[in-house]
Image (cartoon, coloured by chain):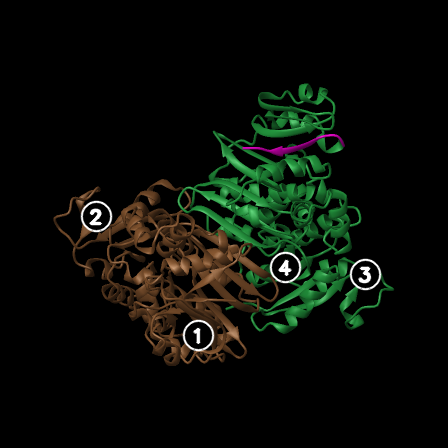
Chain colours: A brown, B green
């Protein structure tokens, strides 16, 4: 039933090495890594030299290779590799959320034009099989919303600030020491990484292509002890939530910290775990939890994509045809806790329907509504004196 | 890409009616209900009379029908319908866990022999796509365990005894009034229903065929205030857990109440919700939550199976070939809280490694180890004076 796949692999970091090992261990998949393209000629390699090449065309032009697995960091180089492979009729597996989010429409069109599959389960929430479930299981369901904790780094930091009383800076340092955060954590802590994932989920949920710049994201980099204390006093936990849903006849999406109450399923999603909750008309609430990053969870998702290719699986992108007329819009207001130092921000954001206002010599906040379009315009991620979180 | 399916439907209760409606509403599936076999001629029907027949052969012998959807209660009649349909080369969808659990090996062999698909996602945990995920996503993963809250009725009752302080009898009555429990709740409260589901999961996890009688199940029907108080004092919740896992070189499985600690993902699975947790070598812990029963969640799962058939999907049962040499065994001990009235039960169960022993005029319990084979032999479900729960 399944074909024997010959794989050309780009990148041989922890995920690539894990993949190589696992493919030699499992009996279930008929696939082998035949060639590996890496950058550094001088690095010692754990397997025989004949596997390696330093020229991408040695893989891309090799007609005996059926599948390209792309596991490199650089999003631009990755896009060149992936698009060239698709043009050559090779199936492709990638985990590169940034690259996919920035080029999703082109990548979709390349798949249609060249009639080849491109799978990327590992790009969103690691081991959680969310894209495949959205594609396969809910194609006939009336999906209303997808909400998730899609970034393990920030969830680890938020767990430590909440449970151990650490400051944001202390928790970030700990996460970096444990390898949960990179030395330059910007993409994670400013919520770009979960935004890339949200954009991919949005496409597989509502069939829309949206540009990263059009989705509001705000991270946890300005989280202060005042914010943590506010949450604790109310019995909330703060989680960084990516959310897309139908609001009337439009689709909205954003990534923003949110106050989570006890009994909410996200409340106990701790440390580096990810979770996604779907709201659907027929199946009601569905919740998935698993590890979002790391070599094994990522490798496991890549492996599943490879296994799926051996059974000719491909994304059908049914929602693009089904729901194509639902427009994406930022003309939608969120109810937010806004902690600030300079009052001018409230005018700039055009905060309205204010229900609470607090002032002390140290801390000022309001709770009120702000449109997503105003949030994007204010470039909040570039400020250091503002923290916002979604309130009820 | 997808074919147009003509469906012969057995049973027209809430799920069947919901299915009929939904198939007329969704654009995603190319399928129609062409004929419906029901029992009672005199019942008023919400749709035109020409749809109905009272003779099963009018569907089974009709070559223009591609798919049989079986949604009747009676497990014996259901097996006759399903096996005859498979023999006639029709694809079949069913939600009948009892029927499937009792005949899984025959049903597997019929699929192989007649080369037809038989899908039953709705039979296990309703809207949670667990079979499809076990089949499709984890075929290459080294699965170690599957653990779940697979029965909504008992989970509703346990939520009420724990959160509202109701007695078991009060909570059962409430569940019956709300339609979460049947007037004869035996299959649910004595844990036969979750055992049927566990048996199906066990097959898709470890590839083994096990008979229902060979799996230990003990329910919540003897839960007393003393047991609830014990749990509350320790900070635990009691949940009815179905569990299968590799213990050394064998596979074990059972359904038994278990003390659940805070931060365990099952702790906050409340009311009629179901949840399943997978333990896998590469993807680590995976957790799925959703509604386990009800017309919409069940209908949604049935619908997904129909959609999958239109893309020629079928279960591959890869684990049967992969892990076939792992034997199922009841030669494995659980650490249990055993509350009893007559001391003789401790000898009968051959309780060993006792770590706690409590005696008061009203309540006696021990904590110690008991083999699954001894638990089965003691027919605990038939006694009224014993409650057991899995302890750490």
Secondary structure under tag 4 reads: helix
- Do marks 3 and 1 both belong to one polypeptide chain? no
> What is the x, y in percent for residue A225?
37, 57
Secondary structure under tag 2 reads: helix
- Do marks 4 and 1 both belong to one polypeptide chain? no
Identify the residue under disc 1: A208
In depth, the one of B254 and B343 nearer the eye is: B343
**Magenta span of residues:** B384-392
**For residue A91, above or below residue A36:** below
Q: For mark 1, does the 10 Å Cα neighbourhood hold few (<14), some (14 to 19), or many (20 or more) residues? A: many
Do the numbered discs 3 and 1 sit on residues whose CB atoms are within 8 Å? no
Work out how far the residue at label 1 is from the one at label 2, CA to CA, in angstroms. Answer: 40 Å
Work out how far the residue at label 3 is from the one at label 1, CA to CA, in angstroms. Answer: 47 Å
> What is the x, y in percent for residue B233?
61, 37
Q: Is residue A1 visible?
A: no
- Residue B54, disc: 3
Work out how far the residue at label 2 is from the one at label 3, CA to CA, in angstroms. Answer: 66 Å
**For residue B175, above or below residue A204:** above
Work out how far the residue at label 3 is from the one at label 4, CA to CA, in angstroms. Answer: 27 Å
């Amino acid at each position: 039933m399944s074909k024997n796949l010959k794989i050309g692999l780009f990148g041989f970091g922890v995920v690539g090495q894990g993949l190589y090992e696992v493919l030699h261990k499992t009996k279930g998949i008929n696939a082998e890594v035949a060639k590996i393209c890496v950058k550094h000629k001088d690095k010692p390699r754990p397997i025989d030299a004949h596997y390696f090449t330093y020229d991408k065309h040695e893989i891309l032009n090799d007609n005996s290779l059926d599948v390209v697995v792309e596991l490199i960091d650089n999003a631009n180089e990755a896009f060149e590799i992936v698009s060239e492979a698709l043009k050559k009729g090779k199936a492709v597996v990638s985990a590169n959320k940034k690259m996919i989010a920035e080029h999703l429409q082109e990548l979709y069109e390349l798949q249609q034009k060249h009639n080849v599959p491109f799978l990327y389960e590992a790009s969103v929430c690691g081991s959680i099989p969310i894209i495949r479930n959205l594609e396969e299981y809910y194609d006939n369901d009336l999906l209303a919303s997808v909400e998730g904790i899609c970034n393990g780094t920030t969830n680890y930091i938020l767990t430590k600030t909440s449970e151990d009383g650490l400051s944001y800076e202390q928790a970030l340092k700990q996460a970096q020491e444990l390898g949960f955060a990179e030395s330059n954590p910007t993409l994670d802590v400013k919520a770009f990484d979960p935004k890339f994932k949200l954009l991919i989920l949005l496409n597989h949920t509502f069939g829309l292509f949206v540009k990263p710049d059009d989705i509001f994201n705000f991270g946890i980099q300005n989280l202060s002890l005042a914010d943590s204390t506010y949450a604790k006093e109310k019995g909330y936990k703060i989680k960084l939530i990516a959310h897309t849903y139908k609001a009337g006849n439009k689709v909205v999406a954003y990534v923003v910290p949110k106050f989570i109450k006890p009994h909410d399923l996200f409340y106990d999603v701790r440390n580096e775990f990810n979770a996604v909750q779907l709201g659907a008309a027929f199946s009601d609430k569905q919740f998935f939890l698993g590890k979002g990053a790391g070599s094994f969870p990522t490798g496991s998702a890549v492996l599943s994509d490879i296994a799926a290719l051996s059974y000719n699986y491909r994304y059908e992108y049914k929602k693009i045809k089904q729901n194509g007329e639902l427009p994406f819009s930022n003309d939608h207001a969120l109810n937010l806790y806004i902690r600030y130092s300079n009052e001018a921000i409230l005018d700039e954001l055009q905060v309205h329907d204010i229900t609470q206002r607090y002032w002390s010599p140290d801390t000022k906040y309001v709770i009120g509504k702000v449109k997503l379009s105003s949030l994007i315009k204010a470039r909040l991620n570039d400020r250091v004196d503002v923290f916002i979180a979604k309130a009820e």
